[in-house]
């Protein structure tokens, strides 16, 4: 069975493959240990640019490298949690695509879990 997740905010794909015999805890473990996807791919420059454009009121406001690294890690955790919850929600609904062992996750799956995700984070 394969799960695909298009992370539309940062523009990358997460592709997790596992077999039908895997249990849910093992599924979560495999999602957490995605080997072929660099989950810290939100560039630090992008984080700084977003903060300067949206969060900082004065151009003289600065941010330390340590803070940007912390925010990068937070975004990584946030994206992983969004993937895990989307997969779990899709699995609990029994929506397994067209029966070929694949589940396609899209923005609608993300929208279904966003409310509780934001409250929990």
Image (tube, rainbow, N blue to C red):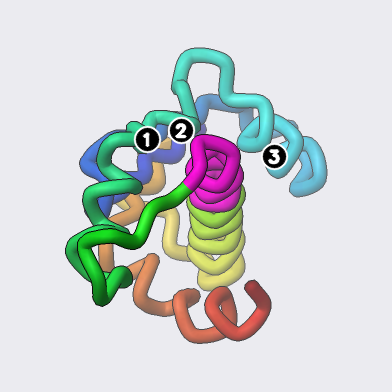
Label 2 sits on residue: 2
Judge whether residue 31 is colored magenta: no
Mark 3: give few (<14), some (14-19) or many (20+) Cα within 10 Å.
some
- The answer to whether residue 80 of the structure is visible from this angle is no
- Whole-angstrom CA distance, mark 1 to mark 2, is 30 Å
Q: Magenta stretch: give its range.
A: 64-76
Q: Is residue 81 above or below residue 25?
A: below
Q: Earlier in the sequence, mark 3 or mark 2?
A: 2
- Tag 2 secondary structure: strand
The residue carrying mark 1 is 44
Residue displayed at 46% across by 33% down:
2
Q: Please name the residue that numbered disc 3 is placed on.
A: 27
Q: Is residue 73 magenta?
A: yes
Residue at (27, 64) in percent of width and height: 107
Above or below for 22 versus 62: above
81 or 91: which is nearer to us? 81
User: Distance from label 1 to label 3 (Cα)?
Assistant: 29 Å
Can you give x and y, in whole percent of width and height, for residue 61 in the image? 34, 61
Q: Which mark is residue 82?
A: none
Q: Residue at x 32, y 47 (%)?
A: 48
Separation of residues labelled 3 and 2 (CA atoms):
11 Å
Q: Quadrant of the C terminus?
A: bottom right
Say whether disc 1 or disc 3 marks the residue closer to the N-terminus.
3
Q: Is residue 56 visible?
A: yes
């Amino acid at each position: 069975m394969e799960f695909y997740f298009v992370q539309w905010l940062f523009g990358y794909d997460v592709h997790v493959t596992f077999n039908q015999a895997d249990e849910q805890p093992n599924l979560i473990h495999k999602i957490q240990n995605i080997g072929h996807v660099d989950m810290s791919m939100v560039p630090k420059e992008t984080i700084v640019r977003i903060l300067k454009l949206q969060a900082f009121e004065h151009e003289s406001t600065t941010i330390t490298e340590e803070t940007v690294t912390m925010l990068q890690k937070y975004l990584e955790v946030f994206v992983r949690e969004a993937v895990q919850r989307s997969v779990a929600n899709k699995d609990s609904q029994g929506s397994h695509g067209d029966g070929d062992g694949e589940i396609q996750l899209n923005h609608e799956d993300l929208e279904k879990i966003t409310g509780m995700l934001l409250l929990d984070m």
